[in-house]
């Protein structure tokens, strides 16, 4: 079916005038008349009939009008749908996030984003740093929000730093090293409560010991969750090496205390990771732009 001719038919039918249709569509009247005759021949139906000085609809033409109206209404919906996707007000974002940004940064970011882009569907997987990059590499997610960059990252991954925070050694306030300054070797004699293997902060701690030729930390209690590890230290067991974003409030309330290790001042990088040479969707790009501004 010739949809252009159907559109001409619909405009003539709704305006009731070939002359008016020609003005609206900027097409000559003879051209419109010729195309309508050709369209009627294609359909093997007569759509218009003489009526006074003008034209009217045949029974078939009258029944075709609401069908054409429905079709062009759907066309407008499709055009709006495409416009929304191009602008990023509709779409889907699949995201992996490590525990730090997932628990302490993403809730506020997502709330602000969804207030503006309510129609965008979002799925967030909280995981450790190793798995977050794997999901990005395997195209299971569109981007990863990463807390604590790995020592090495694949050259196919684009890493954009958002901001930095400090990494702290913390113990309970009753610990003998609370608020004390000690050596790294002394710190490594303490039992550590840490997250599972694959955690970037855990890997940073081991890398720190290798760099300074210090004994490796003794991980005597391990949790898959960050909160559980912190609660164990607050309860009085062991030490933790953790982002200041996580424990700053506990320290300020006196529930945890810092241990100051000579010569150690490390920072943690919060970054957004994407695949190189791959354009993000408009919805995902809007999200990245927003968290850049927030950071």
Image (spheres, helix red, strand yellow):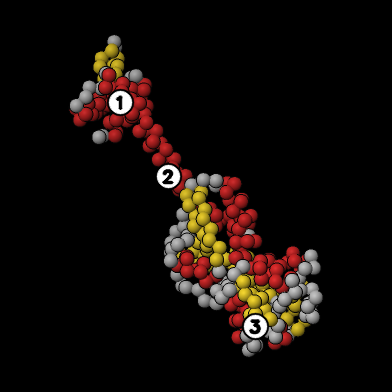
In this rendering, does residue 56 appear at all?
yes
- Looking at the picture, does residue 145 appear above or below residue 259? above
Residue 82 circle label? 2
Residue 89 versus residue 237: which sits nearer the camera?
237
Residue 78, position in %: x, y?
Answer: 40, 40
Residue at (28, 22) in percent of width and height: 61
Residue at (36, 22) in percent of width and height: 14
Residue 47 versus residue 54: which sits nearer the camera?
47
| Residue on which the image places disc 3 | 218
Residue 133, position in %: x, y?
Answer: 50, 68
Q: Disc 2 on helix, strand or loop?
A: helix
Mark 1 crowd level (few <14, some 14–19, many ≥20, 10 Å Cα): some
- Looking at the picture, does residue 131 appear above or below residue 27? below
Q: Are marks 1 and 3 in contact (CB under 8 Å)?
A: no
- Looking at the picture, does residue 221 appear above or below residue 249? below
Give the left or right position of residue 44, taking residue 3 as reference: left
Sequence-wise first label, 1 or 3: 1
Sequence-wise first label, 2 or 1: 1
Residue 155 versus residue 133: which sits nearer the camera?
133
Position of the N terminus, as image quadrant, is: top left
How far separated are the C-alphas under marks 3 and 2?
Answer: 56 Å
Marks 2 and 1: which is nearer the front? 1
| Residue on which the image places disc 1 | 64
Marks 3 and 2: which is nearer the front? 3
Residue 39, located in which quarter of the rendered image? top left
- Looking at the picture, does residue 165 appear above or below residue 54? below
């Amino acid at each position: 079916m010739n949809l252009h001719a159907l559109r001409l038919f619909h405009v003539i039918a709704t305006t009731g005038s070939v002359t008016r249709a020609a003005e609206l569509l900027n097409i000559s009247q003879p051209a419109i008349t010729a195309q309508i005759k050709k369209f009627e021949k294609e359909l093997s139906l007569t759509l218009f009939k003489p009526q006074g000085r003008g034209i009217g609809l045949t029974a078939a033409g009258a029944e075709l009008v609401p069908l054409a109206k429905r079709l062009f209404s759907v066309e407008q919906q499709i055009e709006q749908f495409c416009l929304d996707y191009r602008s990023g007000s509709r779409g889907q974002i699949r995201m992996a996030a490590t525990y730090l940004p997932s628990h302490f940064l993403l809730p506020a970011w997502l709330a602000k984003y969804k207030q503006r882009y309510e129609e965008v569907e979002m799925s967030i997987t909280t995981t450790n740093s190793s798995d977050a990059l794997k999901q990005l590499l395997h195209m299971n997610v569109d981007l990863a929000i990463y807390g604590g960059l790995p020592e090495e990252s694949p050259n196919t991954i684009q890493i954009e730093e958002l901001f930095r925070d400090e990494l702290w050694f913390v113990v309970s306030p009753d610990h003998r090293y609370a608020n004390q300054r000690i050596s790294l070797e002394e710190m490594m004699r303490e039992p550590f409560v840490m997250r599972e293997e694959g955690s970037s902060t855990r890997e940073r701690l081991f890398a720190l010991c290798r760099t300074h030729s210090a004994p490796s930390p003794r991980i005597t209690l391990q949790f898959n969750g960050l909160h559980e590890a912190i609660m164990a230290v607050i309860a009085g067991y062991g030490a933790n090496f953790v982002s200041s974003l996580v424990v700053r409030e506990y320290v300020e309330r006196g529930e945890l205390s810092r241990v100051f290790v000579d010569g150690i001042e490390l920072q943690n990088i919060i970054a957004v990771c994407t695949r190189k040479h791959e354009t993000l969707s408009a919805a995902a790009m809007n999200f990245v732009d927003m968290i850049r501004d927030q950071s």
